[in-house]
Image: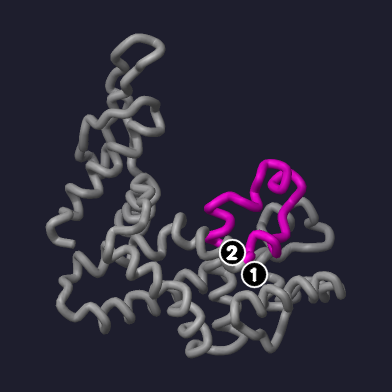
Amino acid sequence: MSLFLPAPSKERKAELYEFQRSAGIKFKNLDFLDLAFHHRSFSNENQQHVRLNNERLEFLGDAVLGMVTASYLYESLADKPEGDLAKTKAVVVSEPVLSEIALRLGIDKCLVLGKGEEQSGGRKKKAILADAMEAVIGAYYLDSGFKAAQEFVLRNIVPEIAKALDNRHIRDYKTLLQEFFQKKYKTCPVYELVKKTGPEHDRTFWTNVILNGVTYGPATGKNKKEAEQAAAKLAWERINPPEEA
């Protein structure tokens, strides 16, 4: 099976050239970049003609991103303990941050999605954008080598590190918690609605989060989503005390 998709059209090449200009990078082989934008929903709907998607590039890009970010944090934050480095890294390589960078670079405009995913708003979904960002990093590494990929990563990640150190990120604690536990323990947090109090028009939701058998909470919110976010924040801060930041 070919490692690449069919050759991009003239119009598609124009899109890819515009992305490179916007992102400040230049591919030797545009096929790598084109593949980085192909979501599995497209290959699933077009199996007779297209069997490739960006998931393998995403896997590679995740490793390159992690290595470059960890190395930069190790060298630039010499006075910080391992826990602080890990906490900062978790924020800057998280889905919310990567999806923001992807939007800033115009990755959403280049995505190739299946019809169903397109109709459901996939072009703006954080998970799809973050995965595509990692796929672009993986593609650039394969095309131009580690040094070029490192420069691209640092150009986009260093400003996010500064925000994280100043606590200027609006943190999605549910995502942070899930990504942390999936990577470290191969398990996901479980949210448990304890009770609902108050009148129908002014309900308060009480929620626990369970991590590896340990219960954190309850935390409260005006709806289920808000209560789960509050419980995730409580658990995250218990695991990573703010005073250590």
Image-quadrant location for residue 40: bottom right
Quarter of the view holding residue 78: bottom left
Residue 116's place in the image compared with 9, above or below, is above
- Image x and y of residue 132, in percent: 59, 64
Q: Which mark is residue 36?
A: 1
The residue type indicated by label 2 comes to Ala
Check the picture and name the quadrant holding the N terminus: bottom right
User: Callout 1: few (<14), some (14-19), or many (20+) C-alpha neighbours within 10 Å?
Assistant: many
Q: Earlier in the sequence, mark 2 or mark 1?
A: 1
Between the C-alphas of marks 2 and 1, the distance is 6 Å
Counting every numbered tag in the picture gives 2
- Which quadrant does the C terminus fall into? bottom left
Q: Give the residues in magenta.
A: 106-131
**Residue at 39 percent of width and 67 percent of height:** 160
Q: Position of residue 171 (x, y in %)?
A: 35, 51
Label 2's element? Answer: helix
Q: Residue furthest left?
A: 243
Identify residue type, mark 1: Ala
> Is 118 in the magenta?
yes
User: Is 229 inside the magenta-drawn segment?
Assistant: no
Q: Is residue 164 left or right of residue 50?
A: left
225 on left or right of 181: right
Image position, residue 116 (x, y; %):
73, 44
Whether the residues at callouts 2 and 1 have beta carbons within 8 Å, the answer is yes
Instruction: Tell me the tag on residue 132.
Output: 2
Which residue: 36% across, 45% down? Answer: 174
